[in-house]
Image (cartoon, rainbow, N blue to C red):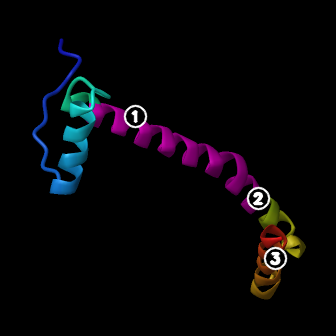
Amino acid sequence: MRSTQQFSITLPNEMADVVKAKVEAGEYATESEVIRDGLRALMARDRAVDAWLREHVVPAAKALAADGSRALTANQVRANLAKRRRASAT
């Protein structure tokens, strides 16, 4: 059984130029390798987002649902963000 599938794809000229440039520069041997590497990066990003949701967002949402007194108002959030922005600017 084959472990690969062949696709025909259409890319905007700008993306096609990037793919061709990567091959011409010797960074990749073929256009397919460029696309595969891009898909690997996309899959890694998706896994990272999924992990962040499972490990941080879901527990925080559950904690907030269990104890609503921990919630911040929109004004409190804005004030905290402004404070962080000022601190990082110095």
Please name the residue shown 35% across and 38% down the image: 39
- Disc on res. 60: 2
* Amino acid found under the numbered disc labelled 3: Arg
In the drawing, does residue 26 fall left or right of residue 67? left
Q: Quadrant of residue 90?
A: bottom right
Quadrant into which the N terminus falls: top left
In the drawing, does residue 16 fall left or right of residue 53? left
Check if residue 47 falls in the magenta segment. Answer: yes
Of 82 and 19, the residue lying toward us: 19
Residue underneath mark 3: 86
| Residues at circles 1 and 2 in contact by the CB criterion of under 8 Å | no
Crowd around label 3: few <14 · some 14–19 · many ≥20 (10 Å):
few
Look at the magenta stretch and give its main secondary structure. Answer: helix
For marks 3 and 1, give the CA distance.
37 Å
Of 65 and 53, the residue lying toward us: 53
| Residues at circles 2 and 3 in contact by the CB criterion of under 8 Å | no
Residue underneath mark 1: 40
User: Which numbered disc, 2 or 3, marks the residue that appears first in the sequence?
Assistant: 2
In the image, which residues are magenta?
34-62
In front of the other: label 2 or label 3? 3
| Residues at circles 3 and 1 in contact by the CB criterion of under 8 Å | no
For marks 2 and 3, give the CA distance.
26 Å
- The answer to whether residue 12 shows anywhere in this view is no
Of 30 and 21, the residue lying toward us: 21
* Amino acid found under the numbered disc labelled 1: Arg
Crowd around label 2: few <14 · some 14–19 · many ≥20 (10 Å):
few
In the drawing, does residue 88 fall left or right of residue 15? right
Q: Please state the horizontal and vertical placement of residue 49, each as a whole percent of the image.
A: 56, 49
* Amino acid found under the numbered disc labelled 2: Ala
Task: Kindly state the secondary structure of the residue where label 3 is placed.
Answer: helix
- Disc on res. 77: none
Q: Please state the horizontal and vertical placement of residue 44, each as a whole percent of the image.
A: 49, 38
